[in-house]
Amino acid sequence: MNLIYMAKNGMHAAQSALNVVVNNTNNFSIPEYHRQDIVFGEAGGKTTPYGFFGYGVQVDTVQRANDNYLNHRIRDAESERGAIKGRLQQMSQIDNLFADDTHNISSEFSKIFVALQKMSNDPVSLPPREETLAQFHVLCDTFHRNSKTLDSLLHESHGKLRQVVDEINSSSQQIATLNVEIEKVYANTRSLPADLLDKRDALLDKLSSQTGIRVHENAVTGCMSITLNNGLTLVNRDSSNRLAMVPTADNPDRFEIHHLDAADNSIPLTAKKIVTGELAGLLKFCQQDLPSVSRSVNQQALSIAHEFNTVNKLGFTSDGQQGRQIFDYPQPVALINDNNISQTKLDVYYENISNVTSLEYELTYINRDENSPWRIMTSDGVEIDAHIQAGGEILFDGLKVSPAGIVQAGDKFRINPLAGVAKNITVAITDCREIAASSSENIEEQSNNENIREFLILKGKKIISGSTLSENYASLVGTTGTNTKQLVMNEHTNKSVCESLSAQKQSVVGVNINEEYVSVIMFTQYYQANAQVMKSAITLFDTLLNIR
């Protein structure tokens, strides 16, 4: 009887092994599938005066191939890659915007001086004047086009941020649900369901590409908790916390990512707190890269307009009138913080455009004393001094700010002195004869071109941060190109790392069809051998029963 029992166990073990092999073979093309291996053990035995006689084989468990350390390395690498890809996709579009060598801000700016030179040669002739006026419009159109592209890119980036946040929330919720199902299976069977673990690992891989995470798993029950790299909880066993896009209190066109706990307590997450994953890349682009480029373009528009307006006002038109400004542009706007106590507004004007910077400012009314009631911080976190006039006007960095109402302590305002300039710059003059070519109001001096010479000087004048317009634009294009190329190189390097780690993981958890084929032959022969033992045992047993 013991022989029959052992043959039965052997057949059962071989059949179980074949089931595992066939399952591996059928699922080998599924990316998230982890190979399963059957683990055999001795079924015990009996010690006799003649020695130890075993009872055969038993199936101890079906083991899921896995390597938690390798998983951790892969997720970290994918998080790094996600940050690079998220930023690179957007930066490439800015790089493409500046790739046009013939119709960009710098080239259109230079064409103005070609037209002005023709006008200088013949100030009386209308065609050169009309060409110059037309080129003013072309330059404005170029600024409009660039500004529109940058605005569209910002809206697109916000859309991608929303999508990533939604996917993070969805993955977190699904992982929490799988935690519950895995714990139920373990409670009933004292084993972990390989198929649910595969699904959860696939979600973890997706989640890690979107944001940096830390995974804490109970190796016995299979329950898992997940935190962001900064320690905030994302999944805690059967519950998950959410991320949300929230408009900033001082600018409804800007968004922050907030972490919401179970009680909906909100913690803002800046690009400094989220450093890996696609979410981090998009945040850095929206909060740093794109605003920097936009400020540069706006500063170019403001500086050009200011310089041309200044020169034109120095000269006289064809009918002897004092020249007026050539370009119109909007005055700065102070954005009111949603949490302000009062309803006071701030009126902002350009006081000295030459001193205007590309920084943003946060103004907080603190009312600490009469001489210094305001604290003014730059976007770099530096506090600056301001001159307060007798009427309450605030003067700093080329701006004049006038409170329109009674400000309360704690009220905050944000000023971007360059916002909207490139988008809204227009040509103020409507007639080419309004270009002030002459330095004399005597209309009989129609050939006077002395003020045109002042215009021509602007081409080489250092009008933006100690550089000419062409130099400043070249610097902007160069910086953007260099940053984009560096991201491309980083992406290539990181891609190689991810592929190498994935290959290592595949060698550990993947299914090798050739190996499974060998296993099929081996376990089939194993089954047949035990079946033969079973047949022999039955024959012996029948022989014994037939003895009289």
Image (tube, helix red, strand yellow):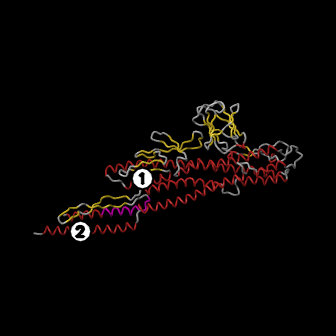
Q: Report the side of 70 relative to 541 (left or right).
A: right
* Residue 190 shows in the view: yes
**Amino acid type of the residue that numbered disc 2 sits on in the rendered structure:** Val
326 left or right, relative to 49: right
What stretch of residues is rendered in magenta? 15-31
**On the image, which quarter does residue 316 sit in?**
top right
Q: Which residue is mark 2?
A: 533
Give above or below for 145 relative to 508. above
Q: Quadrant of the C terminus?
A: bottom left
Whether residue 106 sits left or right of residue 522 in the image: it is right
- As drawn, the residue found furthest toward the right would be 444
For mark 2, give the secondary structure: helix
Q: Secondary structure at mark 1?
A: helix
Residue 218 is situated, as x and y percent measured from the top left of the image, at: 38, 50
- Between 171 and 311, the residue placed more toward the observer is 311
Q: Which secondary structure type mostly characterizes the magenta part of the structure?
A: helix
Residue visible at 46% across and 41% down?
261
- The picture places residue 20, in percent across and down from the top left corner, at 34, 61
- In the depicted structure, whether residue 487 falls above or below residue 291: below
Q: What is the number of the mark on residue 200?
A: 1
